[in-house]
């Protein structure tokens, strides 16, 4: 597993552990939480991971960081939108990893693809279209198949191995994404972007492939932050 993926997984876990302790009433509202070093030792993780977890909970209104004073508890009750916000935050972490993996894969695929790769990309694209009325999970699997074909076309075995390690987390995030954003697979979301990406790779246009891949992920992140 890559360091990027591992760090995001640890941050999510640390945020959830801290949230559970807050909800249990371990600290009163207004109380100062233990320092980063203490919390890191208690959870068996690094201080930087604790810092990111605190930032996540602060963004949800549960914690407050005061310059030079420490971290204080603002609320022991998750906000009404907690499930949606927490899911969106976790999906955003996945999107960040996708940026690190898939944009480079698109560039390499445009430079290295061969006829077999192009055929696989077209087949995966057709499969995505066909899966539009097959349910969320089937559509997500078909969507991932397109991105797997892009990664395979990059002809980098390490990148392919990294992507396969990431797929379970990616699949879960995409299924959550459909619910969080109330998407409807039968309407073929992002169909044009996927087609343009495959077209760019087939044409050997690495610059366009990167631009399309980045725009797709940026749009996804923007929708989650609304």
Image (cartoon, rainbow, N blue to C red):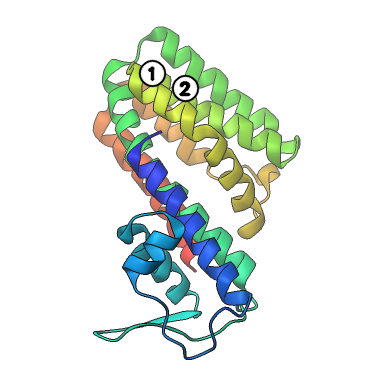
Picture quarter containing residue 22?
bottom right
Residue 206 sits above or below residue 212 on the image? above
| Residue 16 numbered tag | none
Label 2 crowding class (10 Å Cα cut-off): few <14, some 14-19, many 20+? many
| Residue 149 numbered tag | 2
Residue 179 sits above or below residue 146 on the image? below
The x, y position of residue 183, in whole percent, is 64, 53
Residue 185 sits above or below residue 69 on the image? above
Label 1 crowding class (10 Å Cα cut-off): few <14, some 14-19, many 20+? many
Give the residue pinned by disc 1. 153
The x, y position of residue 126, in whole percent, is 60, 24
Residue at coordinates 40% horizontally, 42% vertically from top-left?
5
Picture quarter containing residue 21?
bottom right
The x, y position of residue 187, in whole percent, is 66, 46
Distance Cα–Cα, label 2 vs label 1: 6 Å
Relative depth, front residue between 22 and 64: 22
The x, y position of residue 178, in whole percent, is 63, 51
Secondary structure, mark 1, is helix
């Amino acid at each position: 597993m890559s360091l990027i993926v591992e760090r995001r997984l640890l941050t999510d876990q640390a945020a959830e552990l801290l949230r559970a302790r807050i909800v249990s009433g371990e600290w009163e509202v207004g109380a100062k939480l233990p320092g980063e070093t203490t919390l890191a030792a208690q959870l068996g993780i690094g201080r930087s991971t604790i810092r990111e977890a605190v930032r996540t909970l602060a963004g949800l209104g549960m914690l407050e960081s005061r310059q030079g004073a420490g971290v204080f508890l603002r609320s022991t009750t998750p906000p009404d939108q907690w499930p949606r916000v927490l899911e969106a935050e976790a999906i955003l972490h996945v999107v960040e990893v996708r940026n690190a993996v898939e944009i480079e894969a698109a560039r390499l695929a445009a430079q290295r693809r061969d006829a077999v790769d192009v055929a696989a990309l077209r087949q995966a694209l057709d499969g995505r279209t066909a899966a539009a009325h097959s349910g969320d999970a089937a559509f997500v699997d078909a969507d991932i198949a397109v991105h797997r074909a892009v990664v395979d076309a990059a002809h980098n075995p390490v990148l392919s191995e990294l992507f396969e390690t990431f797929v379970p987390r990616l699949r879960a995030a995409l299924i959550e994404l459909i619910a969080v954003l109330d998407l409807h697979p039968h309407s073929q979301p992002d169909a044009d972007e996927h087609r343009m990406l495959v077209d760019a790779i087939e044409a050997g246009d690495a610059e366009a492939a990167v631009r399309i891949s980045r725009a797709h992920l940026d749009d996804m992140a923007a929708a989650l932050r609304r």
